[in-house]
Structure formats: C-alpha cells, structure tokens
C-alpha cells in the first residue's frame, strides 16, 4: 500500500489536501491523472446504469424492461429532510476520548487485545509503577492489561504497545502472553475499560465512557446565524431522490419499475478518517434508487445485488479479491429489509479482511412513507409506524405530500418499495488503483531485465488512452506524430505526446500511469504510412496503418 500511495502522489493521481500547510485530515485532492481516472469511473457507471441501459428481468416467463433516469440535487436540503429520514437522531458513531493523550477514537476502529506478563520485576513499568487496577499486591506483576491500537498494521502495533506497557525491550517479546484474539473496543464489556491502556497512554483506564457523535456537518444559511438558520451538508445523496420522487414521476411519465441515478458529493464528519481515500470526510457517491411494486421487490433486490457485483468484475476487479456479503440481522440499518455489501480486499487490510465498496439495500417503503407521514420507527412487532413523543405527537412531522404511485393498468395505488445500490466513487477509484498495480521485469532496449511498474487499468477506465511517440526528433517523425496526436484528440480520446528520452523509457513512463496503447512513428512510417502499436499488458507490437489508427484504438477501447 505504501508503494501505491507513493505512486499516486508521484504520478499525479491523489494529493493530500492543503499539503503545503501540513494537510487537512480526511480530505484529498485528485491530481491530473486522478481527475481523469475518477471521471472515467463516474462516466462508465452512468453510461452502464443509465445511458446505455437495456436490461430486463424475467418474471413469470415474461421479460420486464425498465427505465433509468438521472437526477442532480442540491448538497444543502431543508433540515426537516434529515429529521424525517432519521439522520438527525440516528446518524452517529460511538466514540471515546482519552483523558491523558486527548486522542479521540471511533469505538469500532480501536483494536484491542488482552495480554499479561509473568515477570516479577520489570524495569520502567509505566513510569515505574503499574496502575492499581492491574497491580498484584506489592509485586510489580501484571495480572492482565488490554492494549489498544489504531494502526493499519495493528498486530505489530499491539505487540509494540504491550512491550511499552510492560517496559520490555523488543528482544523480550516472548515474555508477553496473549489471552485471546484481537477484537475491537466496541466488543468488550464496558467494565473492562478500566484495564485498557489507550495508544500512547501511560496508565490504564484513561478512556471515557462511549458516547454518540453525530456525523453530519452543520452549516448556517443566511446572514443572521441564529439556530433557526442551521442546516446540514448532506450525508448521502439518496434523500434528494426520495423528495423528488413525485417530480420525476410526473415530469418524465416513467412507469414502475424505474430507477433514478445520481452522482454527487456527500459529507460525513468522521471521527478518525483513515486508510488513504477509503474513509474521508468529503466523498462522492454514485447512487440508484430503484422504485418497484412491493410484491416484486425481493426479486429486484436479488437482481441488483448480482448485477452490481458483476459490474466490478467486468471492469477488471478479480473475483478472488471481491466478495458479496449479506448482512446479518444485527447489522441491518433501521430502514433495511435486507442489505448486501460488495467488498474488496484492499491492501491496507489484514489477510482475509475486506472493505466495503458498495451496499445494495432493500429499503422497503421506509423513505417515501417517512417523508409523507413523519419519522418512522419499528414498534414491538417490528412494524414501521410514525414515532411519537410522550404527548402522542409525531416526533418529526412529514411533508404531508402524497408520494404514492397509481398504476393505471391495475388501478392500484401503493407506496413503492425501493432497492438502493449505493457505491462510492472514491472507494471504487481506489479499488481500481489497487487492482491495477503490478510489478514485473521486462527486457529494456538492450535486452537487460528491468523492473517495471505497470497500472493495468481496464481500457475504459485508463486516464490516458494512448501515447504517441516519434522515434527520433527529425526526418519528419515529430510532424507525423503530432498529426496523429491531433486526430486522436479530435476523436475525444485523452492522449499524451512524448518525444523525450529513449523509447524504452517512454514506454515505462506510460506503463506506470496505465496507458493501454502506445503509438510509435518510426523510419518506416514515411514509406508505408504505418506505425507501431504496442499493447501495455501483452507487450505485443503490430504495424497499423496511420490512417486507421484512430479507429483501431477506438475499437480496442470498446472491449
């Protein structure tokens, strides 16, 4: 992962936000190549899901075709939207503070492990004396302690923390005795917090009791700045689609089932953003809200989870590093009837662990009903009803607008169910970067093996589609190369022109940014009007007519 992060900065994929001022944690800037790559991810998603969509589902042996339309809604919405959706009351993470180090941590991101040491005398134990909570009489012997880590390589860090706690040098690591496997802070009993030594702390028990931390960014609308002017940056794009359900249905006259797709920025005030661009405070979502008849929703849920899972594989993600995981009942969100996560084995995770790329949720009719009636909650029978206060009044009132659907064929009126495939553009881009990264050895122009870093992006995603080289800077080669370069640009293909350095070095530069095709104008071009076309992955080189090169590249990009 360190190599990938270094390449991203060196070649202009991703930069730390405000780096010259020390950086802003949780925010990232995309460089020239990263901008092209992420734009391609968004465009390919929108093209496949909306523009070129021609999918169908077989029901009772008959094909059911459906429409997909696009939408773009505002980042700031009416505050009541977030109260009825449940975000105002429920959108939070549990956090703890360390009283000693002043560190703040998300409860489920702190790795902990119980450990003990049988040494009777250990030099330098936590300023010379272990805490009373883990002291055994007058002896300097630890009964047990729980060490904590927030590092990506947490296993090594937990060992380092244990050695620090017991005042042992690294060579005495075998004296440390582990009790059980590593887990997260949210999975241990609150009574055990007294035994936890926070990262960098000198004593146990410095963590506060867990408390809620709302993830929405608050802002002010208007000049007065009073509490009545408070608003929020959206934590998801989905609600903009739900509140426009009637507008979309009436203006486009689409019939159920149909989907509404949106790409846009969202904001979450993460306690501890981490793992490069994986968990950020500002990110971009690619979401679909698919509206359908309640009786058909289970079939559509299955269809969408499989359809989205296959999309990543078609764009080059190996099935060996991709899983489709159904949520257990305890994981389901308050609105969810069923959810499946598409997860990828990111390099910053431990072996066997996966990080979420996309969630496909069966939201039932929760959202449309909430915006009609008021904030919904499950009663003792598991049924959704409007949440009421002690006086029997709705906690948060809905709009009172009719968001039901009338089927003019069956003459039936109902509130549609919703299937939501929700993908992160940033996480998808990061996954494609990680999957593309390869190292191998190839012979240079002198036949000597040379290490090569190559980004094997799918051609549809590659930020640069082709590079054009004149073999030498004379004999009309630069002029012909410039002519081909202009034709490729006119065809809408992002390409590079490079005439500096040996041809082998120029190939290596393009391999490192993932350019799938290189075109070389050489001495034979003037006589037979052909150029050399080199394939990034196979390294195959063929001769192609200069007048056919644009069509050849275009055809190869469609694969």
Image (tube, rainbow, N blue to C red):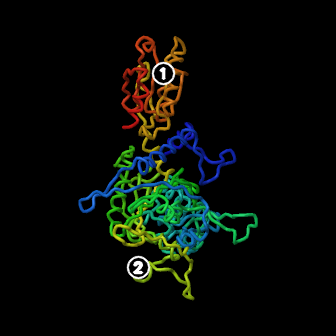
Mark 1 vs 2, N-terminal side: 2
Asked if residue 105 lies left or right of residue 313, the reply is right
**What residue sits right under mark 2 in the picture?**
382
Q: Is residue 349 above or below residue 415?
A: above
Which residue is found at the position 44% from the left and 56% from the top? Answer: 358
Q: Give SS at disc 1.
A: helix
Q: Is residue 117 visible?
A: no
Task: From the image, state whether disc 1 or disc 2 is nearer to you.
Answer: 2
Q: Quadrant of the C terminus?
A: top left
Q: Residues within 10 Å of mark 1 (few under 14, many from 20)?
A: some
Residue 557: x and y in percent read 41, 35
Image quadrant of residue 169? bottom right
Front residue (pair 12, 516): 516
Residue 9: give x, y in percent of width and height: 57, 40
How far across and down, in percent of the image, does residue 57 sit?
31, 57
Q: Secondary structure at mark 2?
A: loop
- Give the vertical position of 470 relative to 49 (above or below): above
Q: Is residue 268 visible?
A: yes
Q: Which residue is mark 1?
A: 503
């Amino acid at each position: 992962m360190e190599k990938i992060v270094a390449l991203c900065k060196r070649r202009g994929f991703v930069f730390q936000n405000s780096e010259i001022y020390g950086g802003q944690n949780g925010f990232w800037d995309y460089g020239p190549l990263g901008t092209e790559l992420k734009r391609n991810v968004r465009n390919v998603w929108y093209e496949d899901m909306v523009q070129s969509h021609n999918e169908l589902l077989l029901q009772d042996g008959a094909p059911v075709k459906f429409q997909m339309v696009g939408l773009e809604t505002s980042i700031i919405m009416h505050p009541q939207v977030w109260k009825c959706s449940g975000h105002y009351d429920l959108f939070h993470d549990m956090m703890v503070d360390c009283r000693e180090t002043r560190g703040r941590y998300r409860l489920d991101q702190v790795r902990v492990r119980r450990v003990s040491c049988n040494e009777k005398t250990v030099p330098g134990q936590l300023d010379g004396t272990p805490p009373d909570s883990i002291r055994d009489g007058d002896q300097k012997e630890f009964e047990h302690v729980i060490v904590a880590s927030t590092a990506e390589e947490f296993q090594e860090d937990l060992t380092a923390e244990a050695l620090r706690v017991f005042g042992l040098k690294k060579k005495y690591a075998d004296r440390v005795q582990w009790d059980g496997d590593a887990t997260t802070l949210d999975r241990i009993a609150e009574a055990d917090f007294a035994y936890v030594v926070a990262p960098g702390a000198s004593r146990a028990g410095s963590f506060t009791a867990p408390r809620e931390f709302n993830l929405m960014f608050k802002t002010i609308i208007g000049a007065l700045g009073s509490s009545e002017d408070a608003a929020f940056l959206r934590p998801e794009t989905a609600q903009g689609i739900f509140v426009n359900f009637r507008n979309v249905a009436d203006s486009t006259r689409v019939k159920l089932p149909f989907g509404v797709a949106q790409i846009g920025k969202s904001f979450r005030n993460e306690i501890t953003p981490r793992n490069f661009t994986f968990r950020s405070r500002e990110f971009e979502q690619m979401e679909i809200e698919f509206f359908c008849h309640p009786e058909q929703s289970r079939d559509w849920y299955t269809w969408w989870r499989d359809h989205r899972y296959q999309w990543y594989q078609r764009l080059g993600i190996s099935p060996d590093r991709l899983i489709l995981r159904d949520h257990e009942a305890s994981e389901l969100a308050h609105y969810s009837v069923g959810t499946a996560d598409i997860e990828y084995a990111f390099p910053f995770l431990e072996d066997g662990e996966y990080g979420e790329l996309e969630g496909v949720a069966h939201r039932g009719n929760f959202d449309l009903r909430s915006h009609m009636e008021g904030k919904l909650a499950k009663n003792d029978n598991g049924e959704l009803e409007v949440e009421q206060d002690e006086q029997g009044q709705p906690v948060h009132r809905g709009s009172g607008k009719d968001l039901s659907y009338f089927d003019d064929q069956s003459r039936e009126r109902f509130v549609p169910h919703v299937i939501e495939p929700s993908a992160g553009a940033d996480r998808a881009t990061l996954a494609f970067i990680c999957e593309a990264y390869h190292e191998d050895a190839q012979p240079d122009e002198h036949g000597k093996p040379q290490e090569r870093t190559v980004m094997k992006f799918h051609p549809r995603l590659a930020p640069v589609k082709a590079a054009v080289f004149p073999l030498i800077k004379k004999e009309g080669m630069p002029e012909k190369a410039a002519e081909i370069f202009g034709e490729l640009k006119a065809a809408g293909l992002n390409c590079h022109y490079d005439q500096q350095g040996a041809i082998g070095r120029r190939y290596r530069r393009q391999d490192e940014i993932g350019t799938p095709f290189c075109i070389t104008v050489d001495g034979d071009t003037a006589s037979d009007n052909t150029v050399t076309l080199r394939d990034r992955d196979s390294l195959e080189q063929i001769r192609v007519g200069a007048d056919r090169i644009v069509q050849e590249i275009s055809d190869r990009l469609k694969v």
